[in-house]
Image (tube, helix red, strand yellow):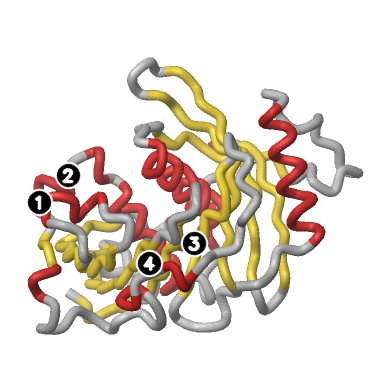
């Protein structure tokens, strides 16, 4: 991974100071390099890629903190790009505490590599605010070897004892809505180069047919494992290419390097046939 630059460090310090003071960033000013762009719920289609990353940031927060906040929308995003390398979204996320139906605001950063580089795309939650964590380097060496390198094309007969087929009832469980998020990330990797974010949303929602989880965690923790590979079969009722029903497969790998608020997704997706 690349080193944290002076600009990265300045950005992180900017957000951290705002949180420590328990206040939002200064009023948006076009002359402020960190002002970002204000978004609304109605921005969802146009900024679907940003909202996807926002949902991932909140999922990472919930996973690490043991909370269950529900995503509402991204209210502000500042984009930092290095062409050919990666893009970072510094976001203000608006969420809801379902237990009290009260609002919750979170500052988060999600980084992804240049989408044009390969069919396999990765995203990293570098940090979520409410922490003074300064080490934002992703530590790939901290991962078990099984979760490094290129994604598998699909599961094989090897390591079958580490696989778990997700039950239909689990797919319907609201606590597992993140499986649908992972599926959307995979679908996005398939179409992001030839469709706009808004055009991709026109093919939603997607219908999951089956999910197979591969992980070294014990069976009872398969869906709560820090490191896992998800083999997802799903259906799109309005395929972007044909406008008809089509079947897809996706491989999504979730990993954590042990640092606070860090999570990474690698995703690959392909169409297998028309129904």
State the separation of the CA atoms marked 2 and 3.
Answer: 26 Å
Check disc 4: other Cα within 10 Å, few if <14, some if 14-19, many if 20+: many
Q: Is residue 274 above or below residue 123?
A: below
Check disc 2: other Cα within 10 Å, few if <14, some if 14-19, many if 20+: few
Residue on which the image places disc 3: 199
State the separation of the CA atoms marked 3 and 1.
Answer: 29 Å
Element under disc 2: helix
**Residue 132 percent location from the top left of the image:** 63, 40
Left or right relative to 250: residue 256: right
Residue on which the image places disc 1: 168
| Quadrant occupied by the N terminus | bottom right
Q: Earlier in the sequence, mark 2 or mark 3?
A: 2
The answer to which image quadrant residue 91 occupies is top right
**Residue 105 percent location from the top left of the image:** 56, 30
Residue on which the image places disc 4: 186
Q: Residue at x 72, y 70 (%)?
A: 82
State the separation of the CA atoms marked 4 and 1.
Answer: 20 Å
Q: Residue at x 52, y 38 (%)?
A: 73
Look at the numbered discs 1 and 2 and tell me whether their residues touch, using CB distance below 8 Å.
yes
């Amino acid at each position: 991974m690349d080193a944290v630059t002076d600009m990265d460090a300045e950005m992180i310090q900017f957000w951290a100071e705002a949180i420590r003071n328990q206040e939002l960033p200064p009023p948006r000013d076009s002359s402020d390099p960190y002002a970002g762009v204000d978004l609304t719920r109605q921005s969802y289609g146009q900024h679907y890629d940003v909202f996807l990353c926002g949902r991932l940031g909140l999922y990472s927060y919930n996973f690490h903190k043991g909370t269950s906040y529900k995503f509402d929308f991204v209210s502000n995003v500042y984009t930092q790009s290095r062409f050919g390398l990666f893009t970072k979204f510094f976001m203000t996320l608006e969420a809801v505490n379902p237990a009290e139906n009260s609002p919750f605001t979170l500052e988060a950063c999600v980084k992804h590599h240049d989408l044009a580089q390969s069919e396999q795309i990765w995203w990293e939650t570098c940090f979520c605010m409410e922490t003074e964590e300064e080490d934002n380097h992703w530590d790939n060496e901290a991962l078990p070897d099984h979760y490094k390198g290129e994604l598998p094309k699909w599961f094989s007969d090897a390591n079958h004892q580490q696989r778990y087929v997700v039950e239909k009832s689990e797919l319907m469980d609201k606590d597992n809505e993140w499986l649908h998020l992972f599926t959307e990330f995979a679908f996005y990797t398939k179409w992001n180069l030839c469709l706009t974010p808004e055009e991709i949303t026109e093919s939603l929602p997607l219908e999951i047919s089956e999910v197979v989880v591969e992980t070294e965690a014990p069976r009872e923790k398969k869906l709560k494992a820090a490191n896992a590979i998800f083999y997802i079969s799903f259906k799109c009722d309005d395929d972007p290419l044909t406008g008809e029903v089509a079947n897809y497969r996706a491989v999504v790998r979730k990993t954590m390097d042990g640092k606070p608020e860090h999570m990474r997704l690698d995703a690959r997706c392909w169409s297998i046939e028309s129904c």
